[in-house]
Image: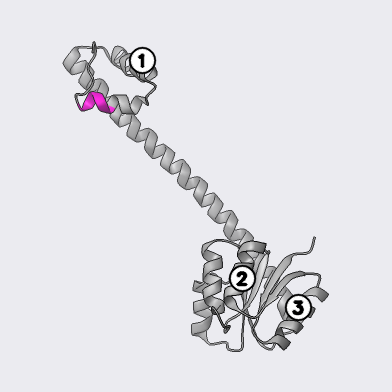
Amino acid sequence: MAQRIIIAEDEAIIRRDLKEMLIAEGYDVIADLGRGDEALEAVRTMRPAAAVLDVKMPGMDGLSVAEAINAEQLCAVIVLTAFSQRSLVEQAREAGVMAYLVKPFQASDLVPAIELALARFDEKLMIEGELGRIHDEHRKLEEKLETRVILDRAKARLMDEYQLSESDAFRFLQKTAMDTRAKVKDVAERVIDGNLKPGE
């Protein structure tokens, strides 16, 4: 299945040439636009695999569009420009641009740039997904450790003040949680705060 591409370039001749190049290379050009704001809206609604954006456009410049696309993780972004200043390359990278092309360019330049951008975007999603999973596991572990500390403090209070054995103290916490349909951690916090006592 052909990769779906959106083009945003304010110069009609370049836009037409770009579209023809992409179609000839087997891509599916689902929109070709002349304004940055329209390009961003098209990306949000049509969800292409990649957006090819000119830097200078009316409505919204290409780097601002790229930044918005990157923030929402919508698709891979390739930027076109007539200039190759280092500062612009740096800005493009900070905006989340995956590949960069300086005009004039050939199909032989365009295709590798698109394929590189698509590969980098997939890699980014995979890495961020993996980091998200690790973060969730870390958070769950922290919650377990926090619950363990609170339970130990509640058991210690029940043992000290009400002379319960450790197993009886834990059973009291567990049974109260089941009877009140509360979390054991919440019951333990009530014991620590003095708002829950055995026999009440």
Q: Residue flagged by tag 2: what amino acid is it?
A: Val
Instruction: Determine the secondary structure under disc 3.
Output: helix
Q: Is residue 76 above or below residue 165?
A: below
Q: State how far apart marks 2 and 1 are (Cα).
A: 56 Å
**At 55% from the left edge and 73% from the top edge, which residue is drawn?**
65
Q: Amino acid at mark 1?
A: Lys
Q: Residue furthest left?
A: 161
**Residue 131 drawn at (x, y percent):** 51, 51
State the residue at coordinates (19%, 13%): 162
Q: Main secondary structure of the magenta part?
A: helix
Of marks 3 and 1, the one in the foreground: 3
Dot 3 corresponds to which residue? 19
The magenta span reads 189-193
| Disc on the earlier residue, 3 or 1 | 3
Q: Which comes sooner in the sequence, label 2 or label 3?
A: 3
Question: Is residue 190 part of the magenta span, yes or no?
Answer: yes
Quick check: 17 left or right of 8? right
Where residue 86 sits in the image (x, y, percent)? 51, 84
Rendered position, 75 above or below 131: below
Label 2 or label 3, whichever lies nearer to me, is 3
According to the image, label 1 marks what residue? 175
- The answer, for residue 122, to whether it is visible in the render is yes
